[in-house]
Amino acid sequence: MSNLKTVENLPTQRGAMTPMDMLNHAVASGANIEILEKLMALQERYEKNQARKAFDEAIAAAKAEIPPIVKTSTAHNNKRYADFASIARAIDPIITKHGLSYRFRTTQNGTINVTCVLSHKAGHFEENTLAGPADKTGSKNDIQAIGSTLTYLQRYSLVQALGLSASDDDDGRASNGKSTTTIDAQQAQNLRDMITAAKTSEPRFLAWARVQKIEDIRAEYYDSCVEAIMNISKARAG
């Protein structure tokens, strides 16, 4: 009975008490080991949940600032793609600012497996794994074939981990004088309504989209814009 009173009669503090507050009070009050173990487990779950929320908020904030990745390289089939250096230049300063980092883990068991580990300074991390065979196209030797696949898998596992998209152009409007289709009036209004609901600013969104006004956003980027704003809303909702 005395141990129950120890937990139930905790002193009132400003704001909600954390499991650590309860644990400290239980220790000071001489609670038994069973109660202490339960409070320690509760504190561990609390810390993991707080770390996950911090991770989600950091991802949403970073994605709101990361511009579409520019496809600057050309593959052997003449298709354009964003190489790893281009991706790193675009994302590294931004994700670092928000306490995020990434690393890769590689295994080989018939196929080459690359795992991108995306971590936050609060301790939460998530993994994304892609696999593929050695790229023996062209005149690559065995080592070059493995290296080509590793680079490819690193690039795409990172892009998927962050939920990024790659762009053929360096901004959300027409490039090189070519006319492109932009979002319609209803889509523009939808984005404005979502921005207001997410309690973010239109200028910040326009800076991320790299356009002067919402109507300049290309139609192919509409879904990416919606996703970015939704991520901000989820982060703010906690």
Image: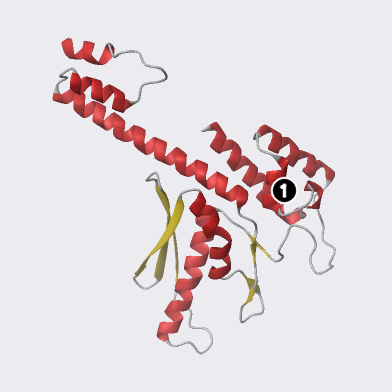
- In the picture, residue 220 is in which quadrant? bottom right
| Residue annotated with mark 1 | 206
The answer to whether residue 116 is seen in the rendering is no
The answer to whether residue 216 is seen in the rendering is yes
Image quadrant holding the N terminus, namely top left
Mark 1: amino acid: Leu
Image location of residue 20, percent across then percent down: 29, 28
Q: Looking at this view, is 109 or 126 the one in front?
A: 126
- Residue drawn at the location 72% of the way across and 44% of the way down: 203
Q: Looking at this view, is 236 or 28 the one in front?
A: 28
Q: Is residue 157 left or right of residue 69?
A: left
Q: Looking at this view, is 200 or 237 the one in front?
A: 200
Crowd rating for badge 1 (residues with CA inside 10 Å; few <14, some 14–19, many 20+): some
- Residue drawn at the location 72% of the way across and 50% of the way down: 222
Image location of residue 162, percent across then percent down: 53, 54
Identify the element where label 1 is drawn: helix
Q: Is residue 188 left or right of residue 158?
A: right
- Residue drawn at the location 46% of the way across and 38% of the way down: 53
Rendered view: 158 above or below 8: below
Rendered view: 26 above or below 148: above
